[in-house]
Amino acid sequence: MKVLTIGFTKKSARRFFDLLRGSGAKRIVDVRLNNGSQLSGFAKKDDLAWFLDEICRMDYVHLPGLAPTREMLRDYRSGRIDWNAYASRFIDLMRKRRIEDTIPREVLSDACLLCSEDQPHYCHRRIVAEYLNEHWGGVEIEHLGMVKPDS
């Protein structure tokens, strides 16, 4: 089973859709809590669903059950908690939600998890993919447009 991930910030629409078109993904699974923000530009839910169908012939699914809570996001963005605490709280939330049992594998198979963060290093989409691999096994994870972090 292959699960891809992508973030839309710091990418032009051309780069974003070229990455998706060449990826082999069948659908985008939007894991953002808020997918309708004006700040999302071309990745606002209704626009994105239309673009994906027209440009990539992909489906669009929004699964807010794979997103952190507003409180977690607020605490992390405000600096009240660091990345490690945020990641730990998010993993606990996925455990409580039992996403490995409640999210159908066929929805995520050959899908691309979408979030806003440009890179996966400090994004919950990476944690979702790794969590599912840990619980399901055999999940090949590919991050589209990834830049390796400085060592």
Image (cartoon, rainbow, N blue to C red):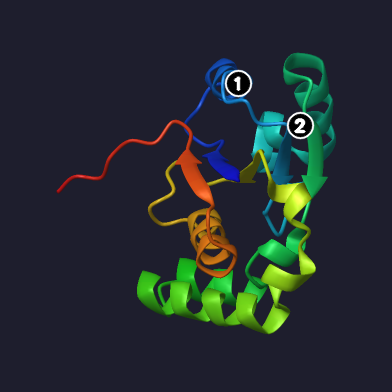
Closer to the chain start, of discs 1 and 2, is 1
Q: For the view shown, which residue lies furthest in the left direction?
A: 151
Name the quadrant containing residue 48: top right
Q: Circle 1 sits on which residue?
A: 13
**Percent x, y of residue 16:** 57, 25
Q: Which one is nearer the viewer's eye here, 131 or 14? A: 131
Q: Circle 2 sits on which residue?
A: 48
Which residue shows up at 77% across the image and 22% down it?
51
**Label 1's element?**
helix
Name the quadrant containing residue 47: top right
Name the quadrant containing residue 132: bottom right
Q: Which one is nearer the viewer's eye here, 136 or 103? A: 136
Q: Which one is nearer the viewer's eye here, 44 or 58? A: 58
Q: Report whether residue 75 is seen.
A: yes
Label 1 and label 2: CA atoms lie apart by: 10 Å
Q: Is residue 116 left or right of residue 100?
A: left
Q: Report whether residue 35 is seen.
A: no
Label 1 neighbour load within 10 Å: few <14, some 14-19, many 20+ = some
The disc labelled 1 sits on which kind of residue?
Ala
Q: In this view, does 15 lie to the left or right of 35?
A: left
The disc labelled 2 sits on which kind of residue?
Leu
**Label 2's element?**
helix
Label 2 neighbour load within 10 Å: few <14, some 14-19, many 20+ = many
Which residue shows up at 53% across the image and 66% down it?
131
Q: Which one is nearer the viewer's eye here, 96 or 44? A: 96
**Percent x, y of residue 109:** 68, 45
**Percent x, y of residue 58:** 77, 27
In the figure, 48 relative to 62: above or below?
A: above
Which residue shows up at 78% across the image and 69% down it?
102
